[in-house]
Amino acid sequence: MVVVITGASSGVGRACAQAFAARGCALVLGARRADVLQDVAEECRTRHGARTLVVPTDITDTKAADHLAREAVAAFGRIDVWLNAAAVAAFGALEEVPHEVFRQVLDVNVLGCVNGARAALSVMSGQRHGTIVNVSSVVGAAVVPYNTPYVLSKAAVRALGGTLRQELRLAGQDGIHVCTVLPATMDTPFFRDAANYSGRAVTPMGPVYTAQRAAKTVVRLAVKPRREAYVGPAGRALEALSKLTPALVEGVLAYEMDRSHLSRTHTAEPADGNVLQPSARLAAVGGGWHGRRRTAMRRFATAALVVGLGAAGRAHVRRAGTKSGMRRWGRADT
Ligand SMILES: NC(=O)c1ccc[n+]([C@@H]2O[C@H](COP(=O)([O-])OP(=O)(O)OC[C@H]3O[C@@H](n4cnc5c(N)ncnc54)[C@H](OP(=O)(O)O)[C@@H]3O)[C@@H](O)[C@H]2O)c1
């Protein structure tokens, strides 16, 4: 299997490179940092004997995305899987995030996926097979505040999956699949490297899952494509809850963001993080958060219990009301 990965230098993309390498796939690694990509390629070669190609790529550049696809075909003859994992984020209230940073988050996260998908399709359409995997997020399904450009972008990525599947079906391209991954919080350098104008340090909202867990899901989708897949039960539970009781989930997520996702005790200087240029800090798969953040899930479990009990109580009152009403009607009838 020939796999192209954008965002392969860090976090989920890097974990996916390792997971695909372990399955004997040939890898084409894209991101901005050439030196870090060389390290990832070296890891995949020495640990797993994988064939690798490094193509430094700024995914906001359409020509660079097309070049990535062309290089993959030149090296390995085809593209079986294209993973769009590259993304950036900017924390802060809507009016706090500078316009150019806001725009760049949308450019990387939305147009980056579009550029990747177009480049992939230019090859896959001729092959009449292939799988595009776009990484969205659970916040594409249940929104949080103080991260608006990212949240908008992830909802757009989820929508892109739907429109692409529809267009492929109408074009009779039933050998090409488009899958959307919706991870809950992942332990990666993402939070450290994000832009932040909130004045408060960013700490991930728990529970925090490993990037390797996301990689397992992505590999599974590459082998057996599905429309959408959550990573981590918290994400699935959140979406189910937000369908059941949207106002409550909106409220709890706002509270959670204000209480714990943005620190109440640690401040942070305004920073554009890795949005406008790559991070100069150590690149890695993990961010050191795994297992440290569980509070949000406990609060959600409590909220779910309250909602469940409330719904059961209301149903009971309705049933009792209907019975006594029927008795009254029955008496009136006689
Ligand atoms: N971490 C989470 O909690 C979480 C939760 C849900 C969804 N996700 C999603 O999972 C995916 C991976 O995120 P992550 O947590 O692994 O983040 P990460 O560790 O910060 O990795 C982001 C990757 O995007 C690349 N990138 C950024 N700007 C780019 C550009 N202009 N062109 C090409 N590559 C660019 C970065 O590489 P360079 O800097 O070298 O370019 C890096 O490889 C993203 O789509 C993210 O939205 C993450």
Image (cartoon, rainbow, N blue to C red):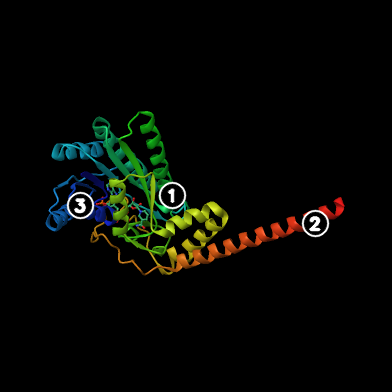
- Few, some or many C-alpha atoms within 10 Å of disc 3 (few <14, some 14-19, many ≥20)? few
- Residue located at (34% from left, 41% from top): 178
Position of 256 compared to 245: left or right?
A: left
Q: Residue 140 carries which label?
A: 1
Q: Is mark 2 within 8 Å of ligand 1?
A: no
Q: Which of marks 1 and 3 is in front?
A: 3
- N-terminal of the pair, mark 1 or mark 3, is 3
Residue 278 visible from this viewpoint: no
- Residue located at (29% from left, 55% from top): 216
In the rendered structure, which amino acid carries the disc numbered 1?
Gly
In the rendered structure, which amino acid carries the disc numbered 2?
Arg
Question: What whole-number distance in Å separates the C-alpha atoms at marks 1 and 2?
Answer: 49 Å
Nearer the observer, 82 or 308: 308
Q: Name the residue under label 2.
A: 327
Question: What whole-number distance in Å separates the C-alpha atoms at marks 2 and 3?
Answer: 68 Å
Secondary structure beneath disc 3? loop
Q: Quadrant of the N terminus?
A: top left
- Residue located at (51% from left, 62% from top): 255
Q: Which of marks 1 and 2 is in front?
A: 2
Q: Name the residue under label 3.
A: 23
- Residue located at (85% from left, 55% from top): 331
